[in-house]
Amino acid sequence: MIEKRNFYIDGQWVAPAKSNDFEVINPSTEEVAAVISLGDQADTDKAVAAAKRAFPGWAAVPKAEKLALLRKLLEIYNARSEEMAQAMSLEMGAPQNLARVQQTGAGSWHLEGFIKAFEAFEFERGYTDTEKTLLEPIGVTALITPWNWPMNQIVLKAVPAMATGCTMVLKPSEIAPLSGLLFAEFVDQAGFPKGVFNLVNGDGAGVGSQLSAHPDVDMISFTGSSRAGIAISKAAADSLKRVSLELGGKGANILFADAPEAAMKYSAVRCFRNSGQSCNAPSRLLVEKSIYDRAVDVVTEVANNTHVGPASKAGDHIGPVVSQAQFDKIQTLIQKGIDEGARLVAGGTGRPDGLNRGYYVRPTVFADVNNQMTIAREEIFGPVLSVIPFETEEEAIAIANDTPYGLTNYIQTPDDEKRRRVARQLRSGMVETNGKGFAQGSPFGGYKQSGNGREGGTYGLEEFLEVKAVSGWAAE
């Protein structure tokens, strides 16, 4: 069994102030995979103090030196990528292929994107002939990251904070902490100055709340549930620190009658990816009535042919969900869909056949859903697809926007004019069309209860900067 009780503070691995062991569960087997420590106030204070001491020196380090360190970090990340894939597979249940290609690949892809954006980034911008606008690091940042895409979110926060001259304390999810601890090893190996990057494990009620309210933290960057984002915002309000949030979603995928059958299949595959544990999953499939019956048949077939199995195996199957709590929540919501009258056409409650241990969920499809049902309103965070019919373009847009969330919506149609027209009217931070993924450096974030910040590329760098106007920069 893995034992990783120490925290990374001020450039060294240190024991927690007091013992507080926490067991990390392998979701494929329900067995204990590792033991970590949960920090308390003394650990949080120590990490924040280290970041505060390091800030003036790190902020003053020339851009070229920061770039060299980031390139070194990328080199180490790529060289040790298999270690990272295995850590994430173990802690959160990503099957081998997904762990290597998408989970680990997301981290290197974003790191490359930030390096490119940082190379071209200007921290001093002329406003008039005599006035200058300066972009300066905000200070000490607290980074609180989730378990579902560990490296995706750690890199999206830690790297732009590093690049812009901020110092930081990272609190990865206590459910999936091994990848964060490994990332700390990479940072240490790359040679970043002590105190720039610090890591303290803990839960939301402990270290998470302590960071949110800490007077010496200048900014919180959080990814997780909308409920937790609200709590963090309230805790941060007393010190008026900046809060950047990437929260939940209930994405609508609008399938117009002229969409090809491949788009129907993609709709289900994309929903079930990562066992449905993605905030940007297209979990509501809106289908134009003339193709509705065929679309239901196709996504039902996809669900029935989606294999579920252990993370230790290679293949294109989906793995378990991350925890008992997550499994129980999904089971409750599937039953709620049945009770409220949605038509269950694939999956349902209970584990898939042949799997009696592990947090495995049956790929599930509900047809004849209306947008007021619980399964259409709440973020399920599992492999559950709700299919909703619509008659007109206007009705599809209204249904898509009728949600407290606004992270990612999807459109499937070969009609370019229609696709652009509908995209302009969808109230979400991102709109993916025809299965076309976003470019490196695209801004990731949402409207409404999906958050208020943007991550990735130039937008992600700007999240960690203050803006200063200086008059009289040049002679009159």
Image (cartoon, rainbow, N blue to C red):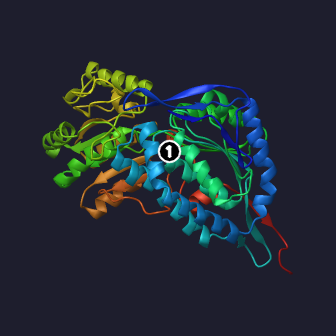
The residue where tag 1 is placed is 150
Per the image, label 1 sits on a secondary structure element best described as helix
Query: In x, y percent, where is residue 132?
Result: 77, 71
Q: Can residue 123 be seen in this view?
A: no
Residue 71 x %, y %: 58, 66
Q: Identify which amino acid the numbered label 1 is placed on.
A: Pro
Instruction: Residue 80: tell me if it is visible.
Output: yes
Q: Residues within 10 Å of mark 1 (few under 14, many from 20)?
A: many
Relative image position of residue 164 (x, y in whole percent) = 68, 60
Name the outermost residue toward the front. 1
Horizontal relation, residue 374 to residue 134: left or right = left
Q: Nearer the viewer, residue 35 or 416?
A: 35
- Asked whether 65 or 368 is in front, the reply is 65
Q: How many marks?
A: 1
Q: Which residue is drawn at 80% across and 77% down?
A: 130
Vertical placement of residue 193 versus 316, above or below: below
Q: Is residue 116 left or right of residue 148?
A: right
Asked which quadrant contains residue 118, the reply is: bottom right
**How far from the left and from the top, in percent, is residue 411?**
31, 52
